[in-house]
Image (tube, helix red, strand yellow):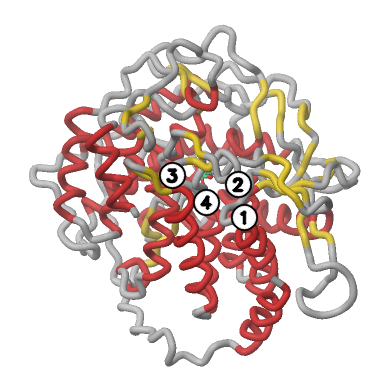
C-alpha cells in the first residue's frame, strides 16, 4: 500500500504537495482561494508528501529510496515560499519529519539498515531550523503567549490574522520545538512552545480542570467551550505526556496527570469497569468545560487515538474497551466516519480521509497485549482500505462512508502514519520493536528515539530560571552556538527477542477482548 501510494506520488505529483489519486496529478496550495483552509493550512508548496514520508521509508528498511528521498528534499525543498500555513500542521508534518529523518541519518547504530547520507552536513537539521524560524512570528505580539494559528513563510503573521486558535494547534508544538532546541542548543523554540502550553494550562476551568477547544490568543477568553478528546484538543493531551517521555520535565507529567484525571471525571460516561457491572459500556463525550454538562452526542474519528495514549500510560484495560467501540464502528462502515452520533448510532459527518488513529491504537494495543485479536483488526482495516479507497493512482479519501463515493485527495498522513502503523503492526522483527533504544512516535507518526541526550537542556546552565519570563516578553534569545549535532546513541542492551505466541497471554486482557468481540 505504501509503495503504491508513494510511487504514484513521485510519478504524478512530486514536487507538488499532495497526490490526487483519482486523476493521477498533483496538488499544491489553492492560490486562487486563500480562504480554502482545508488545503492551504496544510499545503505549503514544499513537497509535503515526500517530506512527511521520509521516516516511513527508513522504518520499512528501504535505504536506497530513503537516501534518494533525503537528497531530493535537501536539493529541491525550500521554505522561502509565499505560503500561509497553519503553524501546527507545518510543525507536525514537516518540522517533525525533518528532525526524525535527521536523527535516523546521524544515529551511530543505524538500526534500520544503512540510512547514512554521503557527505551529510546536517542539512535536514538546518532546514528544520529555517522552517522553525519562519514559524516564530506566530509567537510574537500575542498577549497571552498563545501563538497565532497561521503564518506566511515569507512575511510572517498576515495583517488580517485571526486571533482565535484551537487548543491542540497552539498547545502541541513542544515535542518538535523542544527537540529542535535541544539538538541546536538554542532554547528559543522550546521556550515559546512551552510558554504556549503553560498559558493554555493556566486558562483551564478552576472547577473542572478542563480546557475548551478554541481560545482568543489576545484576551485568553474561551471562544469554544467544548471539552472532549477529539478535534481541537486531541494532541494537546498527547504532547503533555510525550514531552515528558522525551524530555523528562516533571511539570509536563504533572499537567498530563491532572488533565487525565479531569478527563476521567468529566468526559467518561458509562459503567466503571469495561466488562463488569451495570450500565452502558464506557464512552468519552463532549462537555462544557466549565459545567461538565453534555454538549452534544457525537464523537469524532480523531478520538480513536486515545486508546493508544492510554496504552502509553498503562491504562490498558480502559484502552481495550474504548478501542473496541471504535472498531465496532469501523466494522459497520469499513471506515470511521469523521463524526459519529452515538445516540442515533449513525454518522453525523460522513467522510473518511484515510486517517490513522484507529490503526495507531490497534498497533499500540498489540504491542501492549500481544493479543492476535489486534492483528485481526489490522487485517480487517487493511482489507477495507484496499476495497473501498484504492483507486488508479493511490488511495483516495472516502467522501461518504455509506455510499463509498470518493474524493480526489490522498493526505500526506496516509503514508506517514496509516501505512507506517499498519506495517509496524505486522512487522514483529522491526528494529523499532527490537532495538535497545526505545522509540516514541510524534503525533504525525514520526519516529524519535528516546535517549538521554534529549533530556539535557544545555541552556539551563546559563538560564536556570526559565519560568521568570512573562508571557509576551521579548523572544530575543542569545545566539545559538555553532550548530552542533548530538548523535542519538544508546548503550542499552538489546531487548530479548519476544516471541509472539510463546508468551503467556495476559488472561485478563484475553477475557476482555473476547467479551468485546462478542459485543461487536
Ligand atoms: C494527523 O495530521 C495527526 O495525527 C494529527 O495529530 C491529527 N490528525 C492527523 C491525522 O488524522
Q: Which residue is mark 2?
A: 401
- Res. 32 image quadrant: top left
Tell me if the residue at label 3 has its CB under 8 Å from ligand 1: yes
Q: Which residue is mark 3?
A: 413
Tell me if the residue at label 2 has its CB under 8 Å from ligand 1: no
Q: Nearer the viewer, residue 233 or 208?
A: 233
Few, some or many C-alpha atoms within 10 Å of disc 1 (few <14, some 14-19, many ≥20)? Answer: some
The x and y percentages for residue 209 are 80, 47
Residue sitting at 31 percent across and 74 percent down?
A: 429
Give the structural element (helix, strand or loop) at label 3: helix
Residue sitting at 83 percent across and 71 percent down?
A: 272
Q: Is residue 505 above or below residue 270?
A: below
Give the structural element (helix, strand or loop) at label 4: helix
Q: Is residue 177 visible?
A: no
Position of the C terminus, as image quadrant, is bottom right
The x and y percentages for residue 212 are 75, 38
- Marks 3 and 4 sit apart, C-alpha to C-alpha, by 21 Å
Disc 2 + disc 1, Cβ < 8 Å: yes
Name which of mark 3 and mark 4 comes first in the sequence: 4
Name which of mark 2 and mark 1 comes first in the sequence: 1
- Marks 1 and 4 sit apart, C-alpha to C-alpha, by 35 Å
- Marks 1 and 3 sit apart, C-alpha to C-alpha, by 21 Å
Q: Which residue is mark 1?
A: 333
Name which of mark 1 and mark 3 comes first in the sequence: 1
Q: Is residue 245 visible?
A: yes
- Marks 2 and 1 sit apart, C-alpha to C-alpha, by 6 Å
Few, some or many C-alpha atoms within 10 Å of disc 4 (few <14, some 14-19, many ≥20)? Answer: many
- Viewer-nearest of labels 3 and 4? 3
Name which of mark 2 and mark 3 comes first in the sequence: 2
Name which of mark 2 and mark 4 comes first in the sequence: 4
Amino acid at each position: 500500500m505504501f509503495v503504491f501510494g508513494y510511487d504514484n506520488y513521485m510519478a504524478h505529483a512530486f514536487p507538488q504537495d499532495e497526490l490526487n489519486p483519482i486523476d493521477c496529478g498533483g496538488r499544491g496550495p489553492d492560490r486562487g482561494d486563500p480562504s480554502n483552509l482545508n488545503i492551504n493550512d496544510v499545503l505549503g508548496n514544499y513537497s509535503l508528501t515526500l517530506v512527511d514520508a521520509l521516516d516511513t521509508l527508513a522504518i520499512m528498511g528501504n535505504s536506497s529510496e530513503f537516501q534518494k528521498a533525503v537528497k531530493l528534499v535537501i536539493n529541491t525543498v525550500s521554505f522561502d515560499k509565499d505560503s500561509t500555513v497553519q503553524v501546527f500542521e507545518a510543525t507536525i508534518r514537516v518540522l517533525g519529519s525533518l528532525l526524525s529523518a535527521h536523527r535516523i541519518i546521524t544515529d551511530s547504530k543505524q538500526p534500520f539498515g544503512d540510512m547514512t547520507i554521503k557527505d551529510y552536513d546536517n542539512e535536514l537539521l538546518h532546514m528544520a531550523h529555517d522552517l522553525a524560524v519562519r514559524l516564530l512570528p506566530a509567537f510574537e505580539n500575542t498577549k497571552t503567549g498563545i501563538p497565532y494559528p497561521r503564518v506566511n513563510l515569507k512575511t510572517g503573521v498576515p495583517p488580517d490574522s485571526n486571533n482565535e486558535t484551537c487548543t491542540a494547534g497552539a498547545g502541541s508544538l513542544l515535542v518538535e520545538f523542544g527537540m529542535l532546541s535541544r539538538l541546536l542548543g538554542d532554547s528559543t523554540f522550546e521556550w515559546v512552545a512551552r510558554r504556549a502550553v503553560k498559558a493554555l494550562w493556566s486558562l483551564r476551568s478552576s472547577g473542572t480542570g478542563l480546557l475548551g477547544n478554541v481560545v482568543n490568543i489576545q484576551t485568553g477568553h474561551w471562544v469554544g467551550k467544548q471539552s472532549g478528546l477529539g478535534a481541537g484538543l486531541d494532541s494537546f493531551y498527547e504532547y503533555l505526556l510525550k514531552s515528558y517521555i522525551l524530555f523528562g520535565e516533571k511539570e509536563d507529567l504533572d499537567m498530563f496527570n491532572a488533565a487525565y484525571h479531569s478527563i476521567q471525571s468529566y468526559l467518561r460516561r458509562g459503567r466503571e469497569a469495561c466488562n463488569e457491572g451495570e450500565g452502558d459500556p464506557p464512552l468519552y463525550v463532549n462537555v462544557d468545560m466549565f459545567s461538565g454538562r453534555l454538549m452534544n452526542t457525537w464523537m469524532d474519528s480523531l478520538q480513536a487515538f486515545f486508546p493508544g495514549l492510554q496504552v502509553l500510560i498503562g491504562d490498558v484495560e480502559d484502552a481495550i474497551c474504548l478501542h473496541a467501540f471504535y472498531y465496532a464502528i469501523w466494522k459497520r462502515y469499513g471506515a470511521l466516519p469523521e463524526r459519529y452520533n452515538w445516540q442515533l448510532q449513525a454518522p453525523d459527518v460522513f467522510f473518511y480521509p484515510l486517517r490513522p488513529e484507529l490503526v495507531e491504537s490497534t498497533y499500540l494495543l498489540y504491542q501492549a497485549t500481544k493479543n492476535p485479536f489486534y492483528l485481526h483488526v489490522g487485517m480487517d482495516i487493511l482489507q477495507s482500505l484496499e476495497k473501498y479507497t484504492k483507486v488508479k493512482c493511490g488511495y483516495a479519501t472516502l467522501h461518504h462512508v455509506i455510499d463509498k463515493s470518493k474524493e480526489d485527495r490522498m493526505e500526506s498522513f496516509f503514508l506517514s502514519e496509516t501505512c507506517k502503523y499498519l506495517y509496524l503492526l505486522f512487522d514483529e522483527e522491526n528494529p523499532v520493536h527490537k532495538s535497545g533504544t526505545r522509540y516514541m512516535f510524534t503525533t504525525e507518526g514520526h519516529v524519535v528515539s528516546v535517549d538521554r541526550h534529549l533530556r539535557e537542556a544545555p541552556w539551563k546552565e546559563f538560564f536556570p530560571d526559565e519560568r521568570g519570563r512573562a508571557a509576551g516578553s521579548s523572544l530575543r534569545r542569545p545566539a545559538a552556538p555553532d550548530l552542533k549535532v548530538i548523535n542519538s546513541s544508546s548503550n542499552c542492551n538489546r531487548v530479548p527477542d519476544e516471541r509472539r505466541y510463546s508468551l503467556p497471554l495476559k488472561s485478563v486482557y484475553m477475557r476482555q477482548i473476547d467479551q468485546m468481540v462478542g459485543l461487536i
